[in-house]
Image: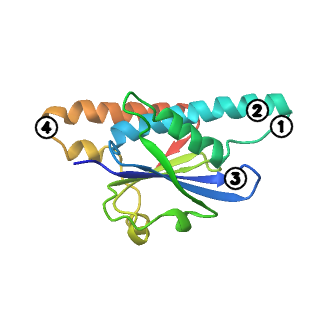
């Protein structure tokens, strides 16, 4: 059984204006996999945006386009790409989708520099109504043998995202 997830990125689009993109991951959508992926995407997108700002003498923040591409790039492994861009629109409500088998949703708000973790389907935005969850609840749902190491991995990923200047939940 796959752990399906959505990563929703909101912020400024490449040419200005509000923008939101939904990326879909069919497998390994739990926090132990996605939080490090988001961390790696923040690092990559920050570096790319800094290089672009220096070259063009600009002072832009990370765009939704850049970050979404960084998520796809950071998801590359020997198995291929784990994440794919599914939809782009002006707001989160338009890109939530109606997929009932999504187990985890992550909203990366580039303007607020935050990552919010939700558990539950994207069907009619149900996850938004329930609110954020502590990503460590994932560790509580697995075999006793792995709980401690999964919890440590999640906490480590959260700390590393915070070191990059982003809030988590």
Q: Which residue is mark 2?
A: 52
Query: How far apart in space, not on screen, are marks 1 and 4 (Cα)?
Result: 51 Å
Q: Residues within 10 Å of mark 4 (few under 14, many from 20)?
A: few
C-alpha gap between disc 1 and disc 3: 15 Å
The quadrant where residue 92 appears: bottom right
Total tally of numbered discs in the picture? 4
Going from the N terminus, do you reach mark 4 or mark 3 first? 3
Q: Secondary structure at mark 1?
A: loop
Q: Which residue is mark 3?
A: 13
Q: Earlier in the sequence, mark 2 or mark 1?
A: 2
Q: Residues within 10 Å of mark 1 (few under 14, many from 20)?
A: few
Front position in the image: 77 or 142 = 77
Do the CB atoms of the residues marked 2 and 1 lie less than 8 Å apart?
Answer: yes
91 to the left or right of 84: right
Pair 2/1: label in front: 2
- Going by the image, does 162 lie left or right of 113? left
Residue in view at x 35 percent, y 48 percent: 26
Query: Disc 2 and disc 3: Cα gap in Å?
Result: 15 Å
Distance (Cα) linking label 4 and label 2: 47 Å
Mark 1 vs 3, N-terminal side: 3
Specify which label sits upstream in the sequence, 2 or 3: 3
Name the residue tied to disc 1. Answer: 58
Residue 144 - label: 4
Question: Residue lying furthest right in this view?
Answer: 57
Seen at 60% across and 64% down, the residue is: 91
Would residue 44 be seen by someone viewing this image from the given angle?
A: yes
């Amino acid at each position: 059984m796959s752990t399906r997830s959505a990563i929703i990125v909101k912020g400024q689009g490449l040419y200005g204006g509000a923008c939101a993109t939904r990326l879909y991951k069919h497998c390994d959508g739990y926090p132990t996999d996605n939080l490090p992926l988001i961390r790696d995407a923040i690092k990559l997108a920050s570096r790319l945006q800094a290089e672009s700002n220096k070259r063009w003498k600009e002072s832009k923040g990370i765009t939704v386009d850049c970050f979404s591409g960084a998520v796809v790039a950071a998801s590359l492994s020997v198995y291929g790409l784990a994440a794919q861009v599914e939809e782009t629109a002006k707001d989160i409500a338009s890109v939530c989708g109606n997929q009932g088998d999504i187990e985890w949703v992550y909203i990366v708000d580039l303007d607020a520099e935050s990552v919010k973790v939700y558990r539950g389907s994207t069907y009619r935005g149900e996850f938004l109504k329930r609110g954020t969850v502590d990503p460590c609840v994932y560790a509580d749902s697995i075999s006793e043998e792995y709980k401690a190491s999964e919890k440590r991995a999640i906490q480590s990923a959260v700390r590393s995202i915070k070191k990059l200047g982003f809030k988590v939940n």
